Amino acid sequence: MHRLETKSLAYSVLVRRLIAYLVDILLLFAAIVVTQFGLEALTGGLPMRLLTTGPRIEVWVWLSVSLPTYLYFALSESSAHQATPGKRLLGLHVTDLTGKRIGFGRGILRTIVKLIPWEVTHLSLFLPTPIFMDGQGGFFPGLITANVLIVVYLAVVVMTAGKRGIHDLVASTLVLRAPPFVTKRSYQEARSGAGMSGTHHTQHFYLPGQRKGT
């Protein structure tokens, strides 16, 4: 019965993690679209008028979409909340393998690896020739590669019951669901879903920034 409850909790984290990611993507999309249309309105169509070649489009996408996305995830997950707005909404947070808050460097590494499929996608769409100028289908190999990567990424998350993706394995991080105050035993049980071992002695511990008794 205990094992079934642990498994149910683990896959609850998986579902929450996927929903949280969708929430974050929607928030980012809204912010980026508003910013780009606002910039276009303020500048009379600049820089859109300059986006006439693949390299120019790629630089614009990196500066206006990729970079803000990297900073959004890395700054949020290395903050005192240890989570993006989406993760906070779903009751999740990111930790290192000992349950501690991660730094910005680890957060940016985690994000870069996570977004490799996205980077491969827009590189394929815009380089060397933008998709709307390419009549030969030269972008297909890149799109196929990106989709294969997405399947692999999802498979790893499913196999670790939502606790770890490839980006977590590379950055040595975990995504856990836990209240602000938990016991060492419940934390070790949460970690066990990621294939990690640990003792089960009940001992209270406090998350970063938390005082005893609160």
Image: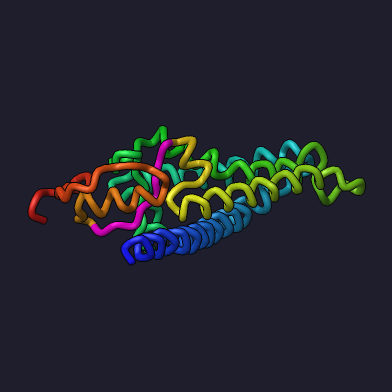
Image location (x, y in percent) of residue 170: 49, 35
Name the main secondary structure of what is drawn in magenta: strand
Q: Is residue 173 magenta?
A: yes
Q: In the rendered view, how is the structure colored? A: rainbow
Residue farthest to the front? 1
Measuring 8% from the left and 54% from the top, which residue is drawn there? Answer: 213
Image location (x, y in percent) of residue 88: 35, 59
Front residue of 201/59: it is: 201
Measuring 65% from the left and 45% from the top, which residue is drawn there? Answer: 149
The answer to whether 166 is drawn above or below residue 14 in the figure is: above
Q: Is residue 210 magenta?
A: no
The answer to whether residue 93 is visible is: yes
Measuring 33% from the left and 53% from the top, which residue is drawn there? Answer: 190
Front residue of 180/156: it is: 156
Q: What is the magenta range?
A: 172-179
Residue farthest to the top? 105
Q: Seen in the image, is 83 located left or right of residue 137?
A: left
Q: Quadrant of the C terminus?
A: bottom left
Marks counted in the figure total 0
Front residue of 212/187: it is: 187
Front residue of 111/155: it is: 155
Measuring 58% from the left and 51% from the top, which residue is drawn there? Answer: 155
The answer to whether 64 is drawn above or below residue 161 in the figure is: above
Residue farthest to the left? 213
Q: Quadrant of the N terminus?
A: bottom left
The answer to whether residue 75 is visible is: no
Image location (x, y in percent) of residue 68: 51, 45
